[in-house]
Amino acid sequence: MDRIYAPWRSRYFTMDKKEGCLFCEIQKEEEDGKVGILYRGRHWFVIINLFPYTNGHIMVVANRHIEKLSEIRPEEGPELIDILARSENALDEEYHPDAMNTGVNRGASAGAGIIGHLHFHLVPRWNGDTNFMTAVAETRVVSEEVGASYDRLRKYFE
């Protein structure tokens, strides 16, 4: 039997599951580093994904509880585009990926882990990052600890 040591994953299984929306709760935390918030805007915030798909996986999250793109208010749209572009540039500058996935998973059937609170994923990608581990072992290898990703990206949002 093969084993992959990833001690940071144990936090996912042992952390307290709070009632209500995780993103709404995260915004109440005053110490950004404690919850991985890289940036707080007027309508959106940027956060490290605590259970990343690849190194540097971040999310842009609505400050208010909304579910659909059609619910974005006219004053929220320009800031969203600005923060998405800023996030993309930070990932390009710091990680030098070959490509990037940017997207929304709306609803459980679409793969949303947090349902009903609009958020955008930015996932840096490299040639060969979907290698045999994913195809054969059904395992994803993320080589950088989440706190290190936070430290690397924080400077781009100060």
Image (cartoon, helix red, strand yellow):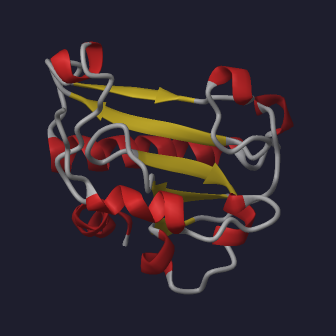
Identify the image quadrant of residue 148: bottom left
Q: Residue at x 23, y 37 (%)?
A: 141
Towards the viewer: 33 or 132: 132
Give the percent coordinates (x, y) of residue 88.
36, 40
Identify the image quadrant of residue 109: top right
Give the percent coordinates (x, y) of residue 16.
63, 71
Find the residue positioned furthest to the front: 1
Find the residue positioned furthest to the bottom: 30
- Is residue 80 toward the left or the right of residue 118 in the image? left
**Figure quadrant of the N terminus:** top left
Q: Residue at x 38, y 65 (%)?
A: 157
- Is residue 21 toward the left or the right of residue 50 in the image? right
Towards the viewer: 131 or 105: 131
**Figure quadrant of the C terminus:** bottom left
Give the percent coordinates (x, y) of residue 122.
42, 38
Q: Is residue 105 above or below residue 5?
A: above
Give the percent coordinates (x, y) of residue 121.
50, 38
Q: Residue at x 50, y 47 (%)?
A: 59
- Is residue 90 toward the left or the right of residue 95 in the image? right
Q: Is residue 22 above or below residue 62?
A: below
Q: Residue at x 62, y 51 (%)?
A: 61
Q: Is residue 70 above or below residue 146?
A: above
Q: How many marks?
A: 0
Towards the viewer: 117 or 38: 117
